Image (cartoon, grey):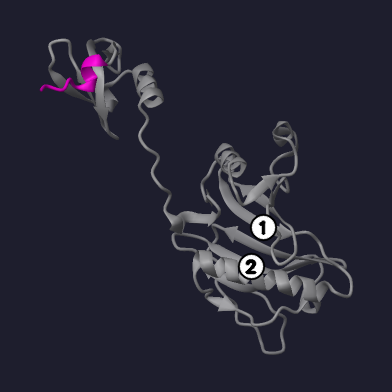
């Protein structure tokens, strides 16, 4: 028994050349990254390079028969599905569908307020909530990502921050392997005011650096993880010096 090709029942359409000067009638059969195959009315299958197809027909093709999305290389990922080079729109869409973070404001407010501090981790890290902050290139692509906890102060700040710090160490090691530099203790009293002291440094697989540490603003302290495209190297600290990179 003969089985009819699905293309025989597909809707035939006109495919124009890139300059619009020529055209061919045919039904879509298949496509790949560089070409599309169509079935002509005389049942001949022809393959056309995508670069030779009119932009409107290419738009139709991408809408009706898009290529399957390639799985992102895990080595490119910073946190969740975010990676360096993502546009603001890509970052927004990824965060909106994330299971790790949630928005603290309605989506209608994003354009008015920006993304900094809007998305927060669904689950607390070591008992503290963490929010996401972004820095962009001039062309609007992601070049830095920082996870920053809510500020902590008071007599129990060291204890609370240490619990969060340890959980971040485990998380970062799971995501990015062993750090290339690490301190075995967090001492918030050694953090200078209005600055961040880094205790751990990870070399990211493809490019950039991740740093874990504690920042201080007056009597308030925060644990922060900063992902940057910069290639930051460890700095040797004297035994009696303050921790940092």
Q: Is the C terminus in the top left, top right, bottom left or bottom right quadrant? A: bottom right
Residue 203 shows up from this direction: no
Task: Residue 172: give x, y in percent of width and height.
Answer: 57, 66
Q: Which residues are magenta?
A: 1-9
Residues at marks 1 and 2, CA–CA distance in whole angstroms: 10 Å
* Residue 110 makes an appearance in the image: yes
Where is residue 162 drawn, in percent x and y?
73, 74
Tell me the quarter of the picture where residue 186 sits.
bottom right
Q: Say what secondary structure mark 1 lies in.
A: strand
Left or right of 52, for residue 209: right
Mark 1 and mark 2 lie on one chain; the one further toward the N terminus is 1
Q: Is residue 108 above or below residue 73?
A: above
| Label placed on residue 180 | none
Quarter placement of the N terminus? top left
**Residue 162 on the magenta segment:** no
Task: Determine whether 44 is above or below 129 in the image.
Answer: above
How packed mark 2 is, by other alpha carbons closer than 10 Å (few <14, some 14-19, many 20 or more), is: some
Image quadrant where residue 36 sits = top left
Label disc, if present, on residue 168 of the rendered structure: 2
Indicate whether residue 4 is drawn in magenta.
yes
Q: Nearer the viewer, residue 62 or 234?
A: 62
Secondary structure of the residue carrying tag 2 is helix
Position of residue 173 in the picture relative to residue 29 (left or right): right
Instruction: Say the numbered circle drawn on residue 147.
Output: 1
């Amino acid at each position: 028994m003969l089985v009819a090709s699905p293309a025989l029942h597909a809707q035939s359409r006109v495919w124009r050349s890139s300059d619009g000067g020529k055209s061919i009638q045919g039904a879509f059969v298949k496509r790949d990254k560089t070409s599309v195959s169509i079935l002509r009315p005389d049942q001949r299958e022809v393959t056309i390079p995508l670069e030779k197809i009119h932009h409107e027909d290419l738009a139709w093709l991408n809408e009706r028969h898009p290529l399957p999305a390639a799985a992102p290389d895990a080595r490119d990922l910073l946190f969740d599905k975010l990676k360096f080079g993502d546009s603001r729109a890509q970052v927004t869409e990824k965060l909106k569908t994330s299971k790790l973070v949630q928005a603290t404001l309605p989506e209608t407010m994003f354009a008015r307020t920006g993304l900094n501090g809007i998305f927060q981790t669904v689950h607390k890290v070591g008992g503290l909530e963490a929010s996401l902050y972004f820095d962009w290139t001039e062309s609007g692509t992601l070049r830095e990502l920082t996870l920053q906890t809510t500020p902590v102060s008071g007599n129990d700040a060291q204890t609370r921050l240490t619990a969060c710090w340890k959980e971040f160490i485990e998380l970062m090691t799971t995501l990015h392997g062993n750090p290339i530099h690490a301190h075995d203790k967090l001492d918030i009293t050694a953090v200078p005011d209005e600055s961040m002291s880094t205790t751990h440094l990870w070399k990211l697989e493809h490019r950039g650096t991740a740093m874990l540490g504690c920042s201080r603003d007056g009597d308030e302290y925060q644990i922060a993880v900063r992902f940057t495209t910069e290639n930051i190297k460890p700095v040797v600290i004297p035994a009696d010096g303050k921790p940092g990179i």
